[in-house]
Image (cartoon, rainbow, N blue to C red):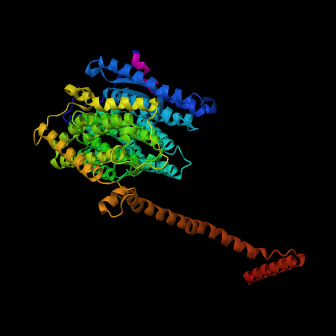
Amino acid sequence: MYVLETGVVPVVAPESADGVFSLLWLIIALPLAGAAILLLGGRYTDRWGHWLGTAMPIGSFILSVVLLVQLLGREEEERQIGQHLYDWIQVGGLDVGADLLYDPLAALFLLLITGVGSLIHVYSIAYMEHDHRRRRFFGYLNLFVAAMLTLILSANYVGLFLGWEGVGLASYLLIGFWQHKDSAAKAAKKAFVINRVGDMGMATAIFLAFVTFGTTDFAGISALADQAPEGTMTAFGILLLVGACGKSAQVPLQAWLLDAMEGPTPVSALIHAATMVTAGVYLIVRSNFVFEYAPTAQTCVIVVAVVTLLWGAVIGCAKDDIKKALAGSTMSQIGYMMLGAGLGPAGYAFAIFHLITHGFFKANMFLGAGSVMHAMDDDVDMRHYGVLNKALPVTFLTFAMGYLAIIGFPGFSGFWSKDKIIEAALAENWLIGIAAMIGAGVTAFYMTRLMVMTFFTEKRWRKDVHPHESPALMTVPLIVLAALSVLGGLLLLNGWIVHWLEPVTGPEPEHELPIPALAITALVTLVVAIGVAVAIVLVQRRPVPDTPPTDVSLVVKAARADLYGDAINDGLVVQPGRRLVTGLFAFDRHGADGAFMGGGGAIAAIGGQLRKVQTGYVRSYALSVLVGVLIVAVAMLAVNF
C-alpha cells in the first residue's frame, strides 16, 4: 500500500469486477426494483407488498455478506473492486460513467445499511399494520435504501450526488408520509429546503472538481490532488463540508432534524441511525484525499463538529418528546463522527467505528421508542410515562442496552468508539478533547433523564392507557440490535477496523497523548458517572411535573427552543430573503413592467388622439385633401419665389 507524505492513500483505478463481484450492481437493483413494483403496482400489491419490500433489502444484505467474505480473502492491495455499468454522461470534456467502487469502506457501509435497514423493514410490518398506505410506505423505504446504496457505491462524485439527491427525495416522502398532519407536511418541506442549501454546496464542489481536475472520479482527483493550489483544495473541502452539514444536520444546517420526528418512527430509525445523517460523515472520509491537502477546510470540519456535538447534547437535555430527545442525541453523536473525520488519519477509522456502533444502538433506541409509543397510544411525552420497565420488559431491557452503549458504559460498543475519538481529539488539541469529554457527560445526563422518566419514577399514564408489550415482529429486531449494541466493540479487537480501513484512510499515525490512555478512559468514565448521578438526583428523586415548569433558566428556555436555530435562520435568511423577493417583485411590477406598460400606454394614447381624425365623413376627408393641396401649393410657390 503506497502512502503519500500527507498520509493520503491515493484511490487507485480499481480492477474490473469478476466472479461474485460482478453482482455488485444487484445490491442496488434489488431495493430499487422493490420500490418500482410497490409504487407503480398500485393497490394490486397491497396484500403482499410489505413482504416484498422487506425481502429486497434482506437480499441485498445477504449479497453484501457474501461480497465481504470474498473481499476478506484478498490481499490488502487488491481490495478495491470496480464495476463499469455503462457510459452515463459524455458532453465535451465531461465523461462520467455509471461506475461502482467496492472497497473496505463501502463494504462496512453496505452491511450497516442493508442489515439495520432490513431489521427496520421487519419492525415496520407490525408497526404500520393498520395504516391503509402501508404498501406505499414500504415502497418509499426501498427507494431510500436504494438511493443510499447508490451514494455509497458510486465511484465518482456525480454518481454519489445522484444517490445524495435520491436520499433527499425519499426522506421528504417519508418524513411527510402522514401528510394529513400539517406538522408532518411542514417538517418534510423544511427538511427538503434546508437540504437543498447543503446540496448547492455539494453541486458547486463537483463543478469545481471538474474545472480543476477535468474529472469527477475519485481515482482521478486523488491522483491530481497534490498538483492543485491549496486555495482551490480549501474551497473544494469547504463546499463538501456545506453539503455534509445539510445531510448530517450539522450546525448551521441542523434545524430540520428534530422536526423530522413527525414521520413514522421506523423512518426516524432509518434516517437517524444508519443512513441519511451518516452520509455527510461518509463524504468527508471518502474525500480524505481532498482534506489532507486543505488544512483550513479540515479545521472547519473540527469546529463545526465540536459546536454541533455540544449543541445537540444541550437540546437533548430539555426535550420531553422521547423522539426529539433522541434526535438531539443523534445530532450530537454525528458531531463526534465529524470530529473524528476532521482529525484526519488519526480519526478516520474511529469516525467510521462510531458511525457503525451508533447505527446499532440508535436504531435500537428509536425502535424502542416506537415500541413505547405503541404501548402508550402514540403519546410521545415522557411526562406521561413512568414505571414502564414492568409493563414492557423486552422493550425495557433492549432499550437499556442501547442506553448503556450511548453513554459509554465500560464494555459496551459506545465505550470503545467514542473514547477513541476523545483520545484522538486530546492528542490533537486539549481544548477540543475537553469539549468532547464535556459532551460525553451531557450525553450521560440527558440519556439517563430519558431512561428514568420513561421506565422508572412513578406512574403518570393518561386515562384509558393500558401499556402492553409489542408483538414479536417488533421485539425481535430490538433484541438483535440490543445484542449488536453490546458486542459492536469487538470491531476494535486487535485494531481490526483500523487495519481494515487502511487501504482507504491510511495507517493510524502515532500520536502523543497528554496523559496515558488508561487515565483518559478513567477520566471520561468519571465524567459520564457524574452526568448519570446528576440526572438521578434531578429526575429520579423528585416528582416529575405533568407539564414543563415555567420558572426555568434562560439556558433551559433556549434548549427547549432548539437553541433558537429556527429564529436564527428566520432572522439571517428567511426575513432578508423575503424582503429581497418583495423588493424584486415591486421592481418587476412598478419598474420593469411599468417601463414596458408605460411605453405601450403612450403609444395607445397617441393612437387615441390620431383616431379622432378618422371621422368617417367624406366631406371632412375632402376638406383635408383640399387643405393639404393648398399647403403643398403654397410651399412650392414659396420655394420658387
Q: Would residue 367 be counted in the magenta stretch?
A: no
Picture coordinates of residue 476 (x, y %)?
A: 41, 29
Residue drawn at point x = 49 percent, y = 41 percent: 174
Instruction: Name the image quarter holding residue 365.
Output: top left
Q: Main secondary structure of the magenta part?
A: helix
Nearer to me, 126 or 637: 126
Q: Quadrant of the N terminus?
A: top left
Residue shown at the point (19%, 32%) measured from the top left = 508
Question: Is residue 4 among the parts visible in the rendering?
Answer: yes
Observer-nearest of 397 and 401: 397
Q: Quadrant of the C terminus?
A: bottom right
x, y percent for residue 337: 29, 40
Give, as a single range, the part of the protein colored magenta: 20-27
Where on the picture, by quarter, is residue 290? Answer: top left
In the picture shown, does residue 489 fall above or below 599? Answer: above
Residue 320 x/y as whole percent: 38, 51
Rendered residue at 23%/29% (across/down): 492
Residue shown at the point (26%, 37%) measured from the top left: 414
Along the horizontal axis of the image, is 109 left or right of 577?
Answer: left
State the image quarter where residue 469 is shown.
top left
Please indicate, yes or no, whether residue 29 appears anywhere in the rendered image.
no
Q: Nearer the viewer, residue 292 or 557?
A: 557
Most distant residue in the left direction: 515
Camera-side residue of 541 and 175 = 541
Q: Position of residue 461 (x, y in %)?
A: 43, 48
Left or right: residue 311 versus residue 133 is left
Q: Residue 26 magenta-drawn?
A: yes
So how many labels did they put on this image?
Answer: 0
| Left or right of 381 in this view: 541 | left
